[in-house]
Image (tube, rainbow, N blue to C red):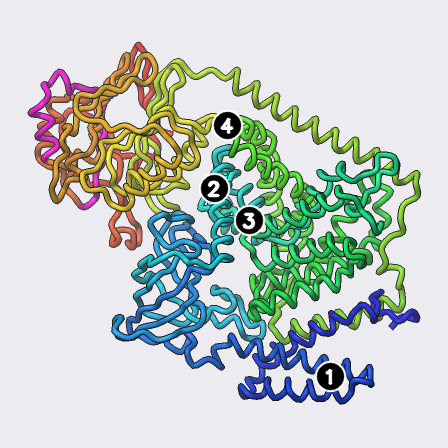
Amino acid sequence: MGSDGTILGLSIRGMTLVAVVSAWIGGILLVDSLKPPSLAAPIGIIIACILIVLLWQDKQGRFIMILLLCVCLGAARYMQVSPDYDPQAIKKFISSDVIRIRGTVSDEPKLVGCKGTTRELIITASSISQDNGAFWQDAHGSLEVLTLGTTIDDPYGANYGDGVELSGKLQSPTMSSPCGNLQSSTTSPPGIFATMAFPRVTVRRSEENLFSNILAFFYHLRVTLASTIARALPEPEAALLIAIVLGLRTPDLNSLPPGLHIPTINSLVTAFNDIGLAHLIAPSGFKVTILAGLITASTRWLYENKKTQDKYLLSTQKHSNWRHQVTTMLVVGSIAAYTLLCGAGPAAIRAGIMGILLVIAPRIGRTYNVYTALAAAALLMSLIDPFIIWDAGFLLSFLGTLGIVLLTPFFQRLLHFMESLPLGGYIAETIAVTLAAQVATWPILFIFFNQKPSLATLLANILTVPLLGTLIMLGMLICATGMLFAPIAMLCGWVVYPLLQYVDIAVIWCLPLLPLALSVEVDSTRAWAYYILLAIVLTLLYQRWPSYFQRPQMHTPEQLQQKQRLRRIWNLLRLGVALLAVVVTGFSELTAQPAAVLTITFLNVGPAGLPSQGEAILIRTPDGKTVLVDGGLDAISLAQALDSRLPSWQHSLDALLLTSPRSDHITATQDILGRYTIGTILDAGMAHPNTTYAHWRRTINERGFRYATLAQGNTVSIGTDVTLQVLWPRSQLHSGSNEVLDNGLIVRLVAPGLRMLLLGAAAQSSYALSGLLNDFSSNSLQSEIVQMVGETNKAFPTRLEDVLQEVHPSLLVVTPGALSATQRKATTPSALVPATLLPSGNWQTLQTAQMGTVEIISSNTGWNMKIL
């Protein structure tokens, strides 16, 4: 303790709330560790209240009894939600029997798994039936549910706020319960004591709770804004900016930028997590703080005195004018909205509460105290959800903030020798903040994420964190302008794109330094010992060098003027770089001329780690028109293929042609509908639409795209010299057990020097092939190239050879269909069609599953083929 009655510079008189909250949390931990009888907490509350009355005149004794009361209140609150004290807790119904559960989706859905093909739902249970719905009884608690799905917001599935009924087997969480004493990394969030894997889910109703509806509104807005960013940037840069600005992880974040192949690293998520930059792509308090600063800076003109240039957000005068009130409301509203928009995670909520307290404290005549604000945030959050104190995000945010406040001045004083160097003060501050956060959080990082202190983490933070404010500002600008006028959002995208590429490169460059991490092993016991030892060391250091823990003194007027000049120079430099990026990128795009040839690219698309599956064909005409035919089975590989072949800022297609509603044709096009502006969408319709096709058509209507159905006899012009002749299906769609194949589109591409017949999946339909032979002569079918979809376990109809004899092709291109579940589980899955199943004749047969991406280049003089 210092001579002035402080500990580490903290006033004991100002720590009352900290002591109260510590007692409250201590009560929660006490019950979790000791599991006392359920009557212990109520009895303790009564005794504490009696002692408070008896000791009212004794100030010290009264305060001790108040702390005891807080311990008992914390214990009682935890007992209310703990399954150990609830006979109707969902945990009590775990068994091997199939049961039915009714509840509400109480958190935003998330895409999980390395391929992003599984949706994770958090369901708050209300009732349960163990006899197939004959009798329902009350149930309490939340469970984690895994369902199939590749879209975060599924219009035909369960979404945030929906009432659902589940039917399946209730199981224990996949890992140990998160409510132990900092045991090991867990998959399930805190407070989740049961899981249900891939149950039958029925959406029953929408939740009428006002708060849930507000959260659901912000969730849907979040998804909409993510689509806006995706339309302004190529992947995976768009996915990275979405994660930075909105804290939303889209499937494209599970990939690496094209051309990058790193051992043991298969996605940007893995790279950011391993390097210690998870706070950049997850909802974090740092982002909320940055946003508050941006709003403060942008509204300073409302209240700032031009003569004095007061740099504080709120005036300390007792009678502030209406401009201060408007500014206060803007900042508080922005903090609250952004906290909800980021998913209202523990870190964001903690920062939101502290940010709001920072704004309103001077308004009510109080001095802001960061420790009191931290305590208030912890109290409010644990009051709502006591399990939050075991949440990794909460612990990292809470301890990281505390460490930055306490330790940053200490490390800054140690690094003061760097301030004489160019940008030395800025670099020293960044290093000090990073070191302070690492010292305060590394036991938690190791326990939850197996992450060790590393030089790579320090360097990566120095290289990337300074850009976070700029990225958030530009990201929010893209969201705002994209909702109003897309071309302006594209201009902002031109500015932010090189910055995102720089972040990717910096992270990848730092990865080789990871082996330099400290070799340490930490468990819960060692973590407690570490923090106790850290508190003792800090106390001793403060007694020896108290000035090292104090913030530097205010600058002199001359230093302030110099700092303002440097800030103006830095702002002008950033503006110049932004304008240069816009001019250079715009000039290169405007002067770029399309090649005067027709290119038809059979894209090699397929899920990560598996062979290519599904059909996706990109057509680019000599006059710059672009058409996508089908999309394949995997959105990520399709996005990468398109981004690598189209100009960086082209997020538009002149037409999208869907030849079949099969999953290996339509699945990835759903992502294209969200990321691209499409001139016209064409297909043959569907006699009996399934859920996937209905979702596809619904998205088309919501985006306002032009849509038309095609039938035999229609002609589609692509540019001036390329035409698509629709040969199948007839206007009256065929109904039957195989109608998806029977009604597949067959089109003939006609261009100078080339004719190509796209049979697609209809090559597997005897009905379609027979109709084609009956309705058209040999002259109407003849083509140099024939494309068709083949499957490894299915022979083609015999009518296919008759069609090929009429067509007389010189090249047969076979694209792969989707693998079956058995084939996907094979040791070495293959999408190749066995040679014995392929039609034979005087033509060259090429399988894209074997050759990869194939490109046909055609001009007036003829065509040639290139393997990419």
| Amino acid residing under circle 2 | Thr
Q: Who comes first in sequence, dot 1 or dot 4?
A: 1
Image position, residue 639 (x, y; %)? 42, 36
C-alpha gap between disc 1 and disc 4 = 66 Å
Image position, residue 174 (x, y; %)? 43, 68
Q: Mark 2 = which residue?
A: 224
Up the image or down, 602 lies above or below 97; here it is above
Q: Which residue is painted at 19% across and 20% down in the image?
A: 783
Contact between marks 2 and 1 (CB within 8 A): the answer is no
Q: Secondary structure at mark 3?
A: helix
Q: Secondary structure at mark 1?
A: helix
Up the image or down, 480 lies above or below 276; here it is above
Contact between marks 3 and 2 (CB within 8 A): the answer is no
C-alpha gap between disc 3 and disc 2 = 11 Å
Q: Secondary structure at mark 4?
A: loop
Q: Which mark is residue 341?
A: 3
Q: Secondary structure at mark 2?
A: helix
C-alpha gap between disc 3 and disc 4 = 27 Å
Q: Mark 1 = which residue?
A: 65
Whether residue 116 is in magenta: the answer is: no
Q: Mark 4 = which residue?
A: 649
Image position, residue 383 (x, y; %)? 60, 69
